[in-house]
Image (cartoon, rainbow, N blue to C red):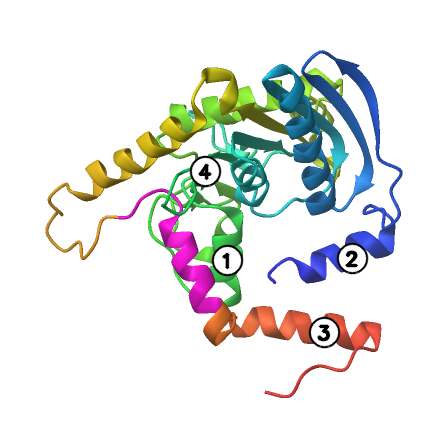
Amino acid sequence: MLRVPRYVDLLQTGAINPKPEMKAERRAGAIVMLEADRAPGAIAMSRAMDEAIGCARTTGIGWCAARNITHAGAVGYFALQAARAGMAGMVMTASGPLMAYHGSRVPGVSTNPLAISFPTGKRALYVIDMSTSTVAMGKLMSARDARKQVPLGWGIDAQGRDTTQSAKIATLLPMSGAKGSGLSFMIECLCSLTVHNPIIANALESGADWDNPFLNGAAVAIDLAAFGDVNRIREEADRLGDAILSLPAAAGVDRILLPGERGDSTLLERERTGIPLPLGTWNRLLATAKALGVRAPEI
């Protein structure tokens, strides 16, 4: 919801291609290179995971590298495609500088997300979906729209100073310092260099003139049947969850959560009560609707 106005802008300028001609440009064993032709990111990465799953059914593992996608949203969605097919999944995307590289005070790498999923027996599918920054850009955007202050450590201002004012954050900070920026760096290597479409080096060498809305992504599927008894693996996944949930909770913790449970619970709540929006987000959506001649819903 936060990004709908931006998506509309990118469609109007032609940066997002509403009728892409996606094609697999190269196939080599378990590897597929997908040219996404500036497709909406959700469509491109869903296709990429389908390609990876198809390879995995034949070779045991599939890796689809997608070039020239656009913003893909929550990449855990695509990782779950693999888990629903009974496979383990991994998804990464790489974009331009938004986050400080550890030790610097300006954007040097992106908030490149990583998601991993795993099928289960009786439990809900396991999935972790995380940004390599302390907090995802979407949360900062939401705080700005709500005109809220944010915790120290989310980002720095244009002068490289710590700030809690969401409107003044110019650069996000990496999670766990060097670990977060190093992970982002390696995702750029895996997603962008492999498809001959470097993003970070081009951006840093171009300086302030750089403006590129295109991303690269990678979708990986691992067929658990290649390891033997799939049912036993799923049973062990359930057993692992049981073992974790049997741990004593820390003070102030009502319930220990397994990977994916918080998101599942939020999904159910949103389906029941709707999606809460900051006033700033709602106003931006209204402005976009008005410009397009779309009647806004009554509230």
Question: Residue 81's quadrant in the figure?
Answer: top right
Q: CA distance from mark 3 to mark 1?
A: 20 Å
If you read the primary sequence from the N terminus, does the residue marked by circle 1 or circle 2 appear first? 2
Magenta-drawn segment: 257-270
Whether residue 109 is visible, yes or no, is: no
Check disc 4 and report the residue beneath it: 133
Q: Residue furthest top?
A: 29
Q: Residue furthest bottom?
A: 298
Q: Nearer the viewer, mark 3 or mark 1?
A: 3
Marks 3 and 4 close (CB-CB < 8 Å): no
Q: Nearer the viewer, mark 1 or mark 2?
A: 2
Marks 3 and 2 close (CB-CB < 8 Å): no
Marks 3 and 1 close (CB-CB < 8 Å): no
Q: Quadrant of the N terminus?
A: bottom right
Q: Position of residue 146 (x, y in %)?
A: 48, 68
The reply to whether the magenta stretch includes residue 114 is no
Q: CA distance from mark 1 to mark 4?
A: 17 Å
Would you call the spot at circle 3 few (<14 residues within 10 Å), some (14-19), or many (20 or more)?
A: some
Identify the secondary structure beneath mark 2: helix
Circle number at residue 287: 3
Image check: 212 left or right of 233? Answer: right
**Looking at the image, residue 147 lies above or below residue 175:** below
Check disc 1 and report the residue beneath it: 167
Identify the secondary structure beneath mark 4: loop
Instruction: Please identify the dominant SS of the magenta region.
Output: helix
Q: Quadrant of the C terminus?
A: bottom right
If you read the primary sequence from the N terminus, does the residue marked by circle 3 or circle 4 appear first? 4
Q: Residue at x 73, y 42 (%)?
A: 70
| Three-letter amino acid code at the position of disc 4 | Ser
| Three-letter amino acid code at the position of disc 1 | Ala
Q: CA distance from mark 1 to mark 2?
A: 21 Å
Circle number at residue 9: 2
